[in-house]
Image: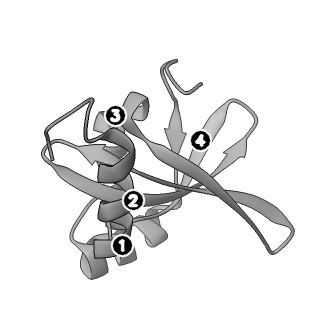
Amino acid sequence: MHNEPKRYEWDDDKNDANRRKHRIDFAAMERFIWNYALGPDFQIEDGEEREFWVGPIDSALYAVAITMRGDMTRVISLRDASRAEKRAWRREFQNDRQDP
């Protein structure tokens, strides 16, 4: 599925805005654990397919929106997972992993 190493890219202005609003840098995606990611949910926005995932970075759960651009994974948004997203993630992975 998503076990292979990923190469990430993003818009620096969007990353700055995300960091101010959500207090996390897109570079944290290097530590996103894809083996424990819930998703994807898909949405088309501005003619572009976007994937929404929930998964762990370090000891917390995050929600990320990405799109594929060739072999690059473009990060659109990264934020703390909502309470409902955390519940759904825990239902899926509670037997496999205790954290986060």
Tell me the amino acid under the disc marked 2: Ala
**Of callouts 3 and 1, which one flags the residue occurring earlier in the amino acid sequence?**
3
Q: Residue at x 69, y 44 (%)?
A: 68
How far across and down, in percent of the image, does residue 28 sit?
29, 46
How far across and down, in percent of the image, does residue 6 sit?
51, 28
| For the residues bearing labels 2 and 4, Cβ distance under 8 angstroms | no
Q: What separation in Å lies between label 3 and label 2 (alpha carbons)?
A: 16 Å
Element assignment for label 4: strand
Q: What separation in Å lies between label 2 and label 4 (alpha carbons)?
A: 24 Å
Q: What separation in Å lies between label 4 and label 1 (alpha carbons)?
A: 25 Å
* Residue underneath mark 1: 84
Tell me the amino acid under the disc marked 4: Thr
Q: Residue at x 21, y 70 (%)?
A: 23
Q: Residue at x 39, y 45 (%)?
A: 92
* Residue underneath mark 2: 88
- In which quadrant of the rendered image does the N terminus lie? top right
How far across and down, in percent of the image, does residue 79 sit?
34, 67
Question: Please, which residue is most extreme toward the right here?
Answer: 47
Q: How is the image coloured?
A: one colour
Disc 2 residue crowd, few under 14, some 14–19, many 20+, Cα 10 Å: some
Disc 3 residue crowd, few under 14, some 14–19, many 20+, Cα 10 Å: some
* Residue underneath mark 3: 33
- From the viewer's perspective, is the residue at label 3 or at label 1 nearer? 1
Q: Say which quarter of the image contains residue 82.
A: bottom left
**Of callouts 2 and 4, which one flags the residue occurring earlier in the amino acid sequence?**
4
* Residue underneath mark 4: 73
Tell me the amino acid under the disc marked 3: Ile
Q: What separation in Å lies between label 2 and label 1 (alpha carbons)?
A: 6 Å
Element assignment for label 2: helix
Q: Say which quarter of the image contains residue 62.
A: bottom left
